[in-house]
Image (cartoon, coloured by chain):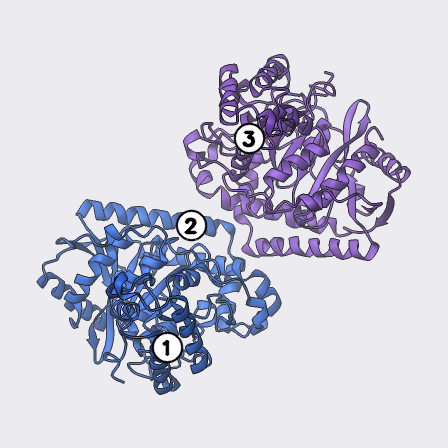
Chain colours: A purple, B blue
Amino acid sequence: MDTDRTGEALAALATELRVGERTPSAYATTVRDRIDERDDDVRAWVDGGKSRAWLRAEADALGDRYPDPDPSQGAEHGGDRPSLFGVPVGVKDIFHVDGLATRAGSELPVGALAGPESTAVRRLRDAGAYVAGKTHTTEFAYFAPGPTRNPHDLDRTPGGSSSGSAAAVASGTAPLALGTQTVGSVIRPAAFCGVVGFKPTRGRIPTDGVIPLSKSLDHVGTFTRDAVGASLAASVLLDGWDDERASEPDEAATLGVPDDLYLDQASDAGRKAFERALDALANAGYDLARVAAIPDIDDVNDRHNTLVAAEAALAHGEWYDRYASRYADATRELIEDGRSTPVSALVRGRRGRNELRDSLAASAAEHGIDAWVAPAAPGPAPGGIDDTGDPMMNLPWTHAGLPTVSLPAGDVDGLPVGVQVAAGFGEDERLLSRAEAIADAVAGAA
Amino acid sequence: MDTDRTGEALAALATELRVGERTPSAYATTVRDRIDERDDDVRAWVDGGKSRAWLRAEADALGDRYPDPDPSQGAEHGGDRPSLFGVPVGVKDIFHVDGLATRAGSELPVGALAGPESTAVRRLRDAGAYVAGKTHTTEFAYFAPGPTRNPHDLDRTPGGSSSGSAAAVASGTAPLALGTQTVGSVIRPAAFCGVVGFKPTRGRIPTDGVIPLSKSLDHVGTFTRDAVGASLAASVLLDGWDDERASEPDEAATLGVPDDLYLDQASDAGRKAFERALDALANAGYDLARVAAIPDIDDVNDRHNTLVAAEAALAHGEWYDRYASRYADATRELIEDGRSTPVSALVRGRRGRNELRDSLAASAAEHGIDAWVAPAAPGPAPGGIDDTGDPMMNLPWTHAGLPTVSLPAGDVDGLPVGVQVAAGFGEDERLLSRAEAIADAVAGAA
């Protein structure tokens, strides 16, 4: 499937919709046509996506709410239309959306999981977007996979847990999709699917209305086709987004490379692709600082995974008590492990998040590092769809709560690979403003 | 000390302040005079209370903000003055108050515990009250006592953990005080000190800005001299307070008595005093239904105490890691116990809260019970101030999150005893509207 030519970059699309060059209804039809064409194979959308009539009704309602801009009032800027006017969004099926069931990739009764609409979805609606449907997630955003396939190779996983959201953007059936990441559930599938994934600083998008996996580690994130689109979505979704900081020019930056046991976790192919991306960055004028930034990666991995298990046991307490037999084996093991974990491990895990954040900040300060770069996944998407791949390259950044973005960086034997860029805590605007130039530098590097 | 004649009932005082019969400044002086007179003995106030000048400045600022009501604009109702205009409030020293340090009865450095002002305090300020100072708490609202003594007998405990708040209201140095309850820290000291303690339904007063002991069990509550005052304070503090429901007439009610192993926990003296209160209620026309409502009290006690320990270990994680040696033995044992607790016990404890709430509701429905009555403490205040007494009579109501109020019910050998009344979840308005008549019935019963 030639995916590169089929999806719209979010910012350009949003402009066309705002100024009236495209209508929400016509674009809804385009999207539905593509779902018809591609989603029998890719299976990004729950229940094959919403019907043509349903999508048209949602799109028409927006047209009614925000009429054509008055040409005398600056129609070329879209008048009063909000920034995501008419944009259809794919929403990972662990977000509550009014009017749509939440199944969370699970066999639990729908009523057990119901709840009020999430703030993240509400913010997109307030910006003029509409929910085009739910996208497949692994069970409860852990590892038991859904039916989604990688648009670049249908015999491979799209990654997870935000499998459907990544695949929908990659197959051109959504210009924007919501996901979540507790270990590597946004950045890894973005890399496997060749799109841009963004996971903001912990806490900058509220996680209410999202079925929790690990309350202190869950992050809401986005999928778009490019970094500009990620910025546009972030400007709507993040608490306290600062346009001014986001538009500061990208001066020559020093990029830190955590060249230690952490980096050794990548596969040979992934490591080679990453080194080619580093060469491309050096050629583009970036300074690279190779630093042993996460030498204690084994400890970090251990305390993060323990914390995920313990908090999953807490979050799923009553659901699991009632419906344990309906849980997939992997999730059941996680929760049972979590239940037997002592509270001390929770305390240690939560404290460790701050310690890693502080040590990375100290290391960045010491070496004049503006952002970190790392492989977005150990390598390209593994074969088969029973395993969504390993999130280990994403884990420490999630643990520390730092903002990260995955940028397409060429391919290995035709399969996309990505570079992951991380900035300091709260530096989402700077990260995304830098991401554009970094994306240009690494595109096609591998 | 003749405490009964020295303190003001909150509602009458607030009316006098609003209509201008008393001024905030004059009342601040009165309160400071009483602190001078009594608090060297009672030691309800941290650092002996705030200075005369400080209190006057706070009171004067309110007078400036809300000038004398215009006689032509209904001066007899206080004009635009809010309902607690000019009322000084004693605040348990685990609430953050802007401008005052939070010590939480502990030896931790003040900077370690600092945080933004609590919503509860903010709501009182918005209603025209001011903070008159911090009152002593046991260490971190657990069992290691502060210096406060029982105003009715200086050789006895005032109860805890809200020791200073109960003693301040009992000794007439505050007409209203804030406390918190995680097991029995409002209702028990209210009973020991002969005042009215009110603990609302779990969640109806936000607990932000309060040093947590157990986040899922902590409740903010109040101390006043009578039930009418508790209603007035509740109308300001509680989410969604419904004046209409609070003013419904108190029809003849059926009061449930949990006559089972729970009740057997009271002392002989406490049990006899409670039976006299029940006789008084029967004489006043209440129907009494003796029901085995909490036969599994041992399980309830166990899972509640386990939950307190585990959540204290979580809440105190980083503080304890850094300052363990500064913790009192009792609190250190609690946290160490909590750290070794498996997550499964947390899950079980949290689930158990809902199960007890449901079983009490079912029992009430089956027997036509409008409210529950029980001893507010096992007996009168024990001797000495090294032990704040046992919260076991309060524990199940806190576990279930039900609203409870402690009403003075006479004395045993000159020491106050109280009756605890509990209503269904969310039925705070009905509870407090009933409490007035119940208080009249049981006053002086023992």
Residue B25: image tag: 1
Q: What chain does badge 1 belong to? A: B
Gap between marks 2 and 3, in whole Å?
40 Å
Q: In which quarter of the image is residue B170?
A: bottom left
User: Which residue type does callout 2 highlight?
Assistant: Arg
Gap between marks 1 and 3, in whole Å?
54 Å
Label 2, on which residue?
Answer: B350
Residue B249 visible in the current orientation? yes
Residue B259 visible in the current orientation? no
Look at the numbered discs 1 and 3 and tell me whether their residues touch, using CB distance below 8 Å.
Answer: no
Residue B122, x across and y down, in percent: 44, 61
Q: Residue at x 85, y 48 (%)?
A: A290
User: Do marks 2 and 3 share a chain?
Assistant: no
Dot in front, 1 or 3: 1
Sequence-wise, the earlier of marks 2 and 1 is: 1
Query: Dot 3: what SS?
Result: loop
Please determine whether, in this image, residue A34 is positioned above or below residue A276. Answer: above
In this rendering, position of residue B192 left or right of residue A390: left
Q: Which residue is drawn at 51% across and 33% down?
A: A327
Q: Quadrant of residue A167?
A: top right
Q: Which of A352 and A121 is in front in this view?
A: A121
Query: Dot 1: what SS?
Result: helix
In this rendering, position of residue A6 left or right of residue B352: right
User: Which residue type does callout 3 highlight?
Assistant: Gly
Please determine whether, in this image, residue B30 is positioned above or below residue B110. Answer: below
Residue A128: image tag: 3
User: Which residue type does callout 1 highlight?
Assistant: Ser
Q: Nearer the viewer, residue A352 or B93?
A: B93
Query: Dot 2: what SS?
Result: helix
Residue A411: image tag: none
Q: Which of A73 and A405 is in front in this view?
A: A73
